[in-house]
Image (spheres, helix red, strand yellow):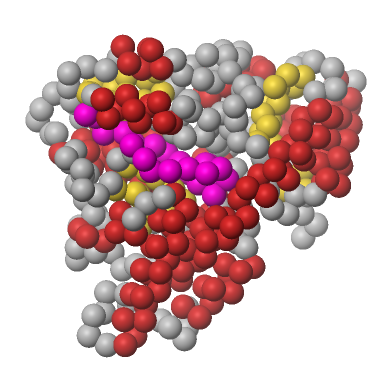
Amino acid sequence: MNYPIYLDYNATTPCAPEVIEAMIPWFGEHFGNAASKSHGYGWVAENAVETAREQIANLIGAQAKEIIFTSGATEAINLAIKGTFDLYKGAKHHYITCQTEHKAVLDTMKAIEVNGAEVTYLPVDKHGNIDLELLKSNILPHTKMICLMWANNETGVIHPISEIAELAEENDIIFFTDAVQAAGKIPISVKGIHLMAISAHKLYGPKGIGALYIRHNHSLPKPMSQIHGGGHEKGFRSGTLNVPAIVGFGKAAEIRLSVMKEESNRLEKLRDILENKLLQIPNTSLNGGQNKLTHVSNIAFGGVEGEDLLRKVCQKVAVSSGSACTSISPKPSHVLQAMGLDSDLGRASIRFSLGRNTTEHDVLNAAEWVGKVMGELRGK
């Protein structure tokens, strides 16, 4: 297949060749169940899982025992939020999140709201930033969790995680962060954080594997299991471990830790080239402020119909209008709406996200093609 230029790395990343190579033996040669404690097949698999757990912990500054494997970030998010909700069932409890969170968070919050939780959805400014004073003023005596993402998946905007963590600590509140887009892209630390969701396929690992960091040795309670049957993963998440994927996740984390800084600098230069070229097109503007991930750019294209724009651009450049989870919907991005963009401009906005295989040739060709598409659409 003659694939277009790929600039949708926030949707998913290709498995690194080293990751694929590391995974292969665990499908056949080392096929044991990591929970089989009585023989060598199980011991070898268990050792591989624990090595990966350590590699992933190193990426986020955690301890290996604080990493709980899940089927992906969506499950990790559900475990964090619903698991906390279940702890306080029957009591009065309040949660604080944000209007620009990923749908995995927002939909889960809506689910616990239906079941009796009180949820505050913080607004953002035109750049996608929250107001820390507003966050502080919304803390109630019965607030149990602050849930705010590390970096936005659509705009790349980075929240002030350290300040939020301090606020949570001062008020003895669980702080949960969706760090899916940040892990492996920028240096992050679990300091002051109680729960953190991460995913392998966003950092050149396989799909179908994620993790929830659960802070150890802390007075605040841990979430209740949502999947029962066998007591795997310290009872937090039952189910036979996907050893090949876990090995791949670990290898991907190890690689990202070693190349992250250099790669981030390289992608920032390419992203700036792309942005500068695209913003030379008349009636275009940048969505989001300057404090954002170095590989992400979200551009609004005025004066065209969004569906036509995306369909035409994607003939030669693979991009998206927002989260892959909501790309099937013709509705404008909830993130951009929360930032104050009108529906038409929201639909005519494109997220460009660069990655390890992106070259300067790619971004120049992509910018040229988008310019050509805009000329055709505006010339109709």
Spot occupied by residue 292 in the image (x, y as percentages of width and height): 60, 30
Left-right relation of 339 to 71: right
Viewer-nearest residue: 295 or 337: 295
Displayed quadrant of residue 221: top left
Q: Quadrant of residue 241?
A: bottom left
Is 276 included in the stretch rendered in magenta? no
Looking at the rendering, in which quadrant would you find the N terminus? bottom right
Q: Is residue 173 magenta?
A: yes
Relative side of 142 to 265, left or right: left
Q: Is residue 348 visible?
A: no
Residue 88, given in percent of the width and then of the height, sits at 14, 34
Count of marks overlaid on the render: 0
Give the vertical position of 48 relative to 139 (above or below). below
**Residue name at image x 43 percent, y 83 percent:** 30
Vertical placement of residue 120 versus 172, above or below = above
- Residue 348 occupies quadrant: top right
Answer whether residue 372 is visible to the viewer in this image: yes
Left or right side of 233 for 374: right
The image position of residue 27, as x and y in percent, is: 47, 78
Residue at x 24%, y 29% (from the top left corner): 173
Residue found at x 33% / y 75%:
46
Is 157 located above or below residue 253 in the figure?
A: above
Magenta stretch, residue numbers: 172-192
Q: Residue at x 51, y 20 (%)?
A: 129
Residue 365, above or below 208: above
Q: In this image, 102 relative to 35: left or right?
A: right
